[in-house]
Image (cartoon, rainbow, N blue to C red):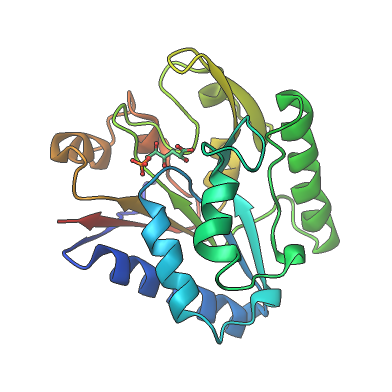
Amino acid sequence: MKTEPQIIRTRNFVADAAAFILEQARKAIAGRNEFRIALSGGNTPAPVYARLAAQAADLPWDRVCFTFGDERCVPQDDPESNFRMARENLFTPAAVPGKSIMRMRGEIDPQVAAHDYQQQLAAIAIQSGEPMYRHDLILLGLGPDGHTASLFPGTAALEEMTRTVVANFVPKLNSWRLTFTFPLINHARNILFLVGAAKSPELIESVLKGDSQFPAARVNPVAGEVTWMIGE
Ligand code: 6PG
C-alpha cells in the first residue's frame, strides 16, 4: 500500500530543505546514535548542502554516514562527479571526517564499483543484524524524464529486484552510471525528493499520481515516509 507523501511547497526551498535534513539527523542520532543519509547529485542539492554545512556546525559528523544514491562514472575531481559537488559544498566546509563518507568509485570499472559498494553496505548491515542496509534518509532528485538517482526510463536497472547497487548504462547519455536500485531505495525510513522551482508541474503531478512510466513514481518505501520539497 502506497503511503501518502507529504508535499511541502516553499519559497524558501534551500532553508526548508536544510532544516528538514537537520531535523532528521538530530532525530536519528538521538534515537540510534547514527544518521545514515544518501546524497543525491545534479545541481539542485548544491545550495542545500552548502546551507547544511553553514548551519550544522554542532552536528556530530562522526555519527553521520554519507552514502550516494548514484554517481557518474568519472574520477572524483571531474566536474560531473556528484562526490565532487558534495565535497565542495558540504564535506570540506563542514570538515566532515573521511570515515563518515562512503564514496562510489566512479573512476573504476562500473560493474566492480557497483558490486564493491553493494558489499560495503551489506557488511555494515550484517554487522548490525539487518537483512539490508537501511537508510534513515535518502535524498532524491527528479529529472525532466522522470528519472531519479540514475534510474532512467527504459534502462535495465529499473527491473533489478535483488541487487541493491548496480552499474546502469544510460543510452540517452551514452554513459554508465552507478545507482541504488528500488529495493534499497524502498527500504529507507525516509525519502526526501528535492525538486527545484524550474521543474515541470505537469511532471510532478504525474509522478505524484503514480504514473509508472516515470521511475520516480516507483519510489514507495515499504515502511517509510516520502516527502516532496518543491520550490516555488
Ligand atoms: C544525478 C542525480 C539525478 C538528479 C536529477 C535532477 O546524478 O544527476 O542523482 O538523479 O537528481 O537528474 O537533477 P537536477 O537537480 O540537477 O535537476
Q: Is residue 198 above or below residue 57?
A: above
Is residue 131 in view? yes
- Percent x, y for residue 41? 48, 45
Q: Nearer the viewer, residue 51 or 231?
A: 51
Q: In this view, does 134 lie to the left or right of 82?
A: right
- Percent x, y for residue 108? 76, 29
**Which quarter of the rendered image does ligand 1 occupy?**
top left
- Percent x, y for residue 155? 50, 18
Q: Residue at x 57, y 73 (%)?
A: 94
Count of labels in the image: 0
Q: In which quarter of the image is residue 58?
A: bottom right
Q: Quadrant of residue 178?
A: top right
Q: Nearer the viewer, residue 106 or 182?
A: 106
Q: Is residue 178 above or below residue 21?
A: above
Q: Is residue 141 above or below residue 107?
A: below
Q: Quadrant of the C terminus?
A: bottom left
Is residue 38 in view? no
Q: Nearer the viewer, residue 228 or 66?
A: 66
Q: Which residue is drawn at 69% across and 33% down?
A: 163
